[in-house]
Amino acid sequence: MRKIYIFFLLLPFSIWSACDKSNDPSRVVIAGGSITEIVYFLEYEDKLVGIDVTSNFPEETSEIPSIGYVRALSTEGILSLKPSLILGEEDMGPPLVINQLKLTGMDLKIINEDRSAQGILEKIECVSKILGITTQERLNKIKNLTRDINLLQSIAKKNEDKDIRIMLILNMQGTSPIVAGQNTSGDGFIKMVGGKNVASNFEGWKPISSESIIAYDPHFIIITERGMSSFSDIESLSNTTALKFTNAAQLGKIYSEDGMAMLGFGVRTIKTALNFAEIFSK
Amino acid sequence: MSFFSLEQKWFKFVKSSQIKLLTFFLIALISIFFLSVTLGSFDFNLRDLLSRKSDSLDSIVLFEIRIPRVLLAAFVGASLGISGASLQGLFRNPLADPGLIGVSAGAALGASFVIVVGSSFFPEFIFGTFILPFSAIIGASFVISLLYIFTQGFGYQGITYMLLVGIAVNAFASVGIGILTYISTDSELRGLTFWTMGSFGGSSWQLIMPALIIISLTVLWLIPSSRKLDLLQLGEPEAYRLGVDVRRLKFKVIISSAVIVGLSVSLSGMIGFVGLVVPHLVRLLGGVNHNYLLPGSALLGASLMMGADLLSRILIQPAELPVGLITSAIGAPFFLWLIFRIRKS
C-alpha cells in the first residue's frame, strides 16, 4: 500500500520533467554537461546559444557563451541570450533562479537523471523528443551505442559474479582521498561496470582515512584525471601512504580517467564503462 | 512633536560641510541606482519600455528581476554600513564589524541547515523560497537571545565581555556549519559554497518586501541614538554621568544591528568587508560624529553595494560572479591601505 502512495507522490515529478516536444527549439541554452554531450551527439549543436561550465566536451563547446556554473546560474544572463528553450540537469540551480525563469514563461525543461546505461538511453530519447528529432533518426544515431550497451551489460553481468572490489577517487584532499560513497555518480559508474563499490557504508563523496582504505582493500582503484594532476604519474600516486598498502597499488591496478567521460553520464560514459568493464573482466 | 525636536538636535550636531557630503552621497546613491537599473546582461531600450512599446519579457526582466535585485543590494549595503558604524561606536573599536557579535554566523548556520538538511525534507515545497531566509532569521534570533542571556540583558559587564561572548558564539556556529558541510552531498556542498560567497540573484518582490520595510524602520529607530554614541566615546561611566542610559543604548544598537544584519545575510548570503570598510571611508571623508556617520554609512554602503552587484552582473556576462568576491576584492586592499595609514600617522 505504501509503495502505491510513494508512486503517486513521485508521479508528478516524473511527468513534470516530461520530454514533450518544444514549440521552438531554435535557440537552446543548456545547464549540464551530459545534455550538451547528447546535443552534440544528435548533431544539433548549431542551435546552442549558451552552455554552463560543466559542458566542456567536445572541445568546440569553448566557443559557445558560458552561463556560469550549473548550480549558480543567473536569470538575466540566461535571458540575455534570448533563448527559446532551456534544458537543464536535475542539479540546475539555485532554486530562486529556476523560479524566476519559470516566471518569465520560458520553456524550461529539467531532464531526469538515472545513473545507469538505461538512464543514458532515456536521456537521449528525452532530448531527441524535445528537439523534435524523429524516432527513426534517433534509432539510426544510437545504433552503435546500443550495441556497446549490450556488450557492456553482458560483461558487467559476468563481472558481478567475480566480486570485484573497486574504489573511485575524485581527488586528494591533502593526504586523504575523496571517495565515492553510495548515491554518487561514482557509485553508479561502478555498478555499470559490474563492480562492487568498497565504500558502501556512507553516502556522498567523503574524505577517507588511510586505515579505512586498508580495510576496504580494493582490487582496483580509479581516479579522475583532475585528481591525478597533483601527481607526476600513477607510480607516485600508489606510493602515497593512503594507497600504498592496498591490493590495487601493489599489483599496479590503479587507473586514471577523465572525470566527465566517466561520471558525466552523457554519451561518453558508455564507452568509458565498456573499457573499464573489459579491463576488470581479465 | 518629539520627532521635530530630534530634527533640531540633528542639525545642531552636523556641520554644514557634512551636510554637503551627505547630499553628495545621496546624489551618488540615486545615480548608481539608475545606472544599475539600466545596465545588465539583458539589453533593452529603457525609453521604449517606458512608452510601452516593447514586449512583455523586457518589462518582466526590468520590474520583476532587476529592480528588486538592485533594491535588495541597496538595502543590504545600507544595513551593513550602518550596523558596522554603530557597532564600531558601541564597542569603541575600529575593527568591529557586523560579523563580530555572531549574528551573521547564526544566520549562516540557519541557512546552511536548510541547504543541507532541508533539501531532503521539502524538495518542491510551496514555500520553498521562503524557507531559507526564514531559517536564517531563526538562526540569527537564536544568537541574539544567546547574547542577551549571557550578557544578562546586554548589561553592565562591559563591552569586552560582550565581544568575547560574540567570539564564542561565532565558534559555536562554525562548528554547526562544519558538521553540516561534512554530512552534505556534493551538490549541497556546492550550494553551500556559493551561498557563503553572497549573491543578490533570485530576488523577488514577495521575498524582499518584508525585509525592506523592517530594515527601513530599524534604521529610523537607530539613527536618533547618534548623539549618545558620540558621548559613549568618552567611556561608559562618563557617558552614564552625562545622562546616557548606556544599557538601553547597548540594547538598541545590538538589537537593531542584529535584526538588519540577520535579514541581510538571510537574503543575500555572506558579504564581507562592507560593514567594516564603509564607516572608515565615511569617517575619512567627513568626520567622526555619529549624526553624520550613521546616515553617511547607510548611504555610502548602499551605493557601494549596488556598484559591486553591478560589477558582479556585467563582468563575466552572461555568467555572474558572487558579489561577496567583489566586495572582498575591493575591501581587502583598501583595508590594508587603512592600516598602513594609521601606522604612519
Image: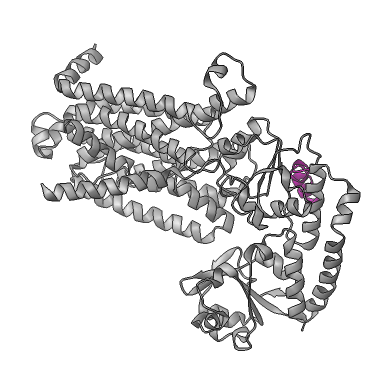
B323 drawn magenta:
no
Q: Residue furthest right?
A: A136
Q: Residue furthest top?
A: B1
Q: Residue furthest bottom?
A: A250
Q: Is residue A20 left or right of residue B58?
A: right
The part of the image, by quadrant, that contains residue B236 is: top left
The part of the image, by quadrant, that contains residue B324 is: top left
B26 lies above or below B164: above
**Camera-nearest residue between A227 and B93:** A227
Which segment did they paint magenta? Answer: A1-18
Q: Taking the image as drawn, is residue B245 in sight?
A: no
Which residue is at 55% across, 22% downward?
B45
A4 drawn magenta:
yes
A277 lies above or below B105: below
**Camera-nearest residue between B239 and B278:** B278
The part of the image, by quadrant, that contains residue B300 is: top left
Q: Taking the image as drawn, is residue A195 in sight?
A: yes
Where residue B174 appears, as percent x and y from the top left, is 40, 55
